[in-house]
Amino acid sequence: MKIYHEVRQYADNYKVWHSMYRNIGFSAHWHNEVELIYAHGGTIRIIVENIEYALNEGDLLICGSHSIHFSDYGSLNNQLEFILFDPDLIISDGSAWHKAIHLTAAQLREYGLADTVSGLFKNVPQELAERKPYYKNIVTSYISSAWYNMLRFFPTESDNINHEGIKKFENALAYIHTHFREPISLKDVSDSMNFTPTYFSYLFHKVIGISFVQYLQTLRLQEAASLMQKSGYKIIDAALDAGFSNMRNFNRIFCKYTGKTPSAFLKENQGEPLTIMLSYTTSDTLPVENDSYVIITENSSPTPKSPN
């Protein structure tokens, strides 16, 4: 499993992005921008910071800045529209929004926000596409107006997230991604955050949804699978270069997560990336086998917005 830090390139360096997708699922990632997800049809489960939200038609989900989020791939039957924006565009004091909020279609109507949200998702993509004079100012005003209307019902005073802790956790993930090929331990990473191993283990599972060991193993497995498929690369060399200490351990873990041997994987998946599937649970109990999941897909594609 990888958790990606998503960094986007923006036209005119204006940090607002929009797209619509059908039947989409997405792997674990985070970014600096706030993300608005509007469901036009179907259903999807999205997990944000280990809390599950079930979106149905007409629902809106707000994913805060730096929030780790991913979707369930159990049923890819949805039509979702996305707006991402840099919180610095509308939040003048330099703070960021780190919470997740799920507004159902019924709540949007109850709070008088249905027209505000539908107008936002109608006008912002039009302005971004046409890029007429002052379009940046107009888009910012649309986002700001909708944002502060929503904050009337969800004031920022209730945001008690430890922002310093979030930054530390991001640094810990960067450390793992840099050193996973080496013999690193839970203590090595927890020491880099000045946390005790026990607390870091709890925090890691709470935020990511799987244990540190599972995360490290899946990183190494995906690296080994990629190396194995390179011409002239032996399985044992791929295993050792990916961070496994010996072939016995590699074979055992590979079979545990994939249900097949490395040789069988090579035979059946020429040129295909390794996909690791586990089951997801929102339990706060200690991590157990098959406690979370990851799947990476490249089959989703943007769909043009239907004219109103």
Image (cartoon, rainbow, N blue to C red):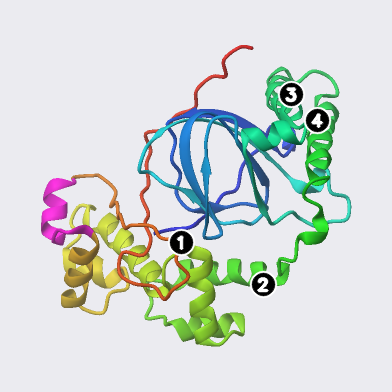
Return the residue at label 2.
Answer: 165
Q: Nearer the viewer, mark 2 or mark 1?
A: 1
Instruction: Rate crowding at label 4 as few (under 14), some (14 to 19) or many (20 or more) other CA atoms within 10 Å.
Output: some
Q: CA distance from mark 2 to mark 4?
A: 32 Å
Return the residue at label 4.
Answer: 142
Residue extending farthest to the right is 92
Nearer to me, 262 or 283: 283
Q: Determine which quarter of the picture holds residue 37.
A: top right
- Mark 4 touching mark 3, by CB under 8 A? yes
Residue drawn 72% across and 67% down?
163
Would you say residue 263 sits in the magenta stretch?
yes
- Mark 1 touching mark 4, by CB under 8 A? no
Disc ID at residue 119: 3
* Secondary structure, magenta segment, majority class: helix
Q: CA distance from mark 1 to mark 3?
A: 34 Å
For marks 4 and 3, the one nearer the N-term is: 3
Instruction: Rate crowding at label 3 as few (under 14), some (14 to 19) or many (20 or more) other CA atoms within 10 Å.
Output: few
Secondary structure at badge 1 equals loop
Q: CA distance from mark 4 to mark 3?
A: 8 Å
Q: Determine which quarter of the picture holds residue 73.
A: top left
Left or right, 89 with respect to 54, comes to right
Would you say residue 253 sits in the magenta stretch?
no
The x, y position of residue 239, in whole percent, is 24, 69
